[in-house]
Image: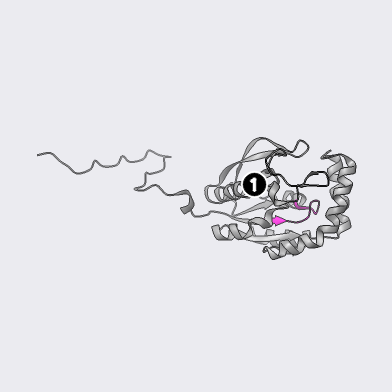
């Protein structure tokens, strides 16, 4: 008489993950970290704040589309990089979800002077419970991150508009992002539009805070 019972599963060797009876869908993974979305006008100090905090950070600007991507919006005679249509929100959300649940993700590297992706890099959480995702389009992801269960907070950095304009211009000229006349014209337009942008980001779920208070509150979370 033959034995029809299933063969026993082999025991995992040291360092190996044990097999499970069923594959777990990626969307069913529980997050091991949560994300603070950090937005604000270009030049308001988002990158400087993330450097001071020293937390794992996703630069959402790296999810811009290449300048020759079909259907890119235009303004000031160039691609309108302040229009969410110039940015890949779905890819950004996928990366944040994977980083928060798996602890590791491959993200694009975007070169702003040439307006295109130039490669990829790997980000890891190293066990940190709080991650940062900063960029002018971070507010676009507030509701979607909340629905994924990975949102810790959503903050919009605010400071006097003339200060933001000046620091943005200094940065963009130093990095040769675009010709100086274009940077000046674009900067003045952004300064005029800033109050409406902040109102929109608030409506999308971000809390407006000055950089110093935002830093204190994020440190308390972390």
| Along the viewing direction, whichever of 85 and 56 lies nearer the viewer | 85
Q: Residue at x 68, y 40 (%)?
A: 69
Q: How many marks?
A: 1
Is any part of residue 48 visible from this angle?
Answer: yes
Residue receiving disc 1: 88
**Crowd class of label 1 (few under 14; some 14 to 19; many from 20; radius 10 Å):** some
In x, y percent, where is residue 164?
84, 54
Q: Quadrant of the C terminus?
A: bottom right
Give the magenta range: 37-46
Give the image quarter of residue 174: top right
Is any part of residue 135 visible from this angle?
Answer: no
Q: Residue at x 66, y 48 (%)?
A: 57
Q: Residue at x 82, y 60 (%)?
A: 159
Q: Residue furthest front?
A: 71
Report the side of 81 relative to 89 (left or right). right
Q: Quadrant of the N terminus?
A: top left
């Amino acid at each position: 008489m033959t034995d029809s019972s299933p063969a026993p599963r082999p025991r995992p060797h040291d360092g190996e993950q044990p097999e499970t009876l069923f594959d777990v869908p990626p969307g069913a993974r529980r997050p091991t970290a949560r994300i603070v979305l950090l937005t604000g006008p270009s030049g308001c100090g988002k990158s400087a704040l993330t450097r001071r905090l020293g937390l794992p950070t996703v630069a959402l600007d790296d999810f811009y589309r290449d300048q020759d991507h079909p259907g890119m919006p235009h303004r000031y005679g160039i691609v309108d990089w302040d229009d969410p249509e110039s940015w890949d929100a779905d890819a950004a959300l996928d990366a944040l979800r994977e980083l928060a649940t798996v602890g590791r993700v491959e993200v694009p590297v975007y070169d702003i002077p040439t307006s295109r992706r130039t490669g990829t890099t790997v980000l890891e959480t190293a066990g940190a419970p709080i991650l940062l995702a900063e960029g002018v389009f971070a507010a676009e992801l507030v509701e979607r991150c909340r629905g994924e269960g990975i949102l810790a907070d959503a903050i919009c950095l605010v400071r006097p508009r003339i200060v933001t304009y000046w620091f943005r211009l200094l940065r963009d000229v130093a990095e040769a992002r675009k010709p100086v006349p274009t940077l000046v014209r674009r900067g003045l337009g952004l300064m005029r539009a800033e109050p409406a942008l902040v109102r929109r980001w608030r409506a999308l779920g971000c809390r407006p805070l000055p950089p110093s208070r935002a830093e204190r509150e994020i440190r308390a979370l972390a």
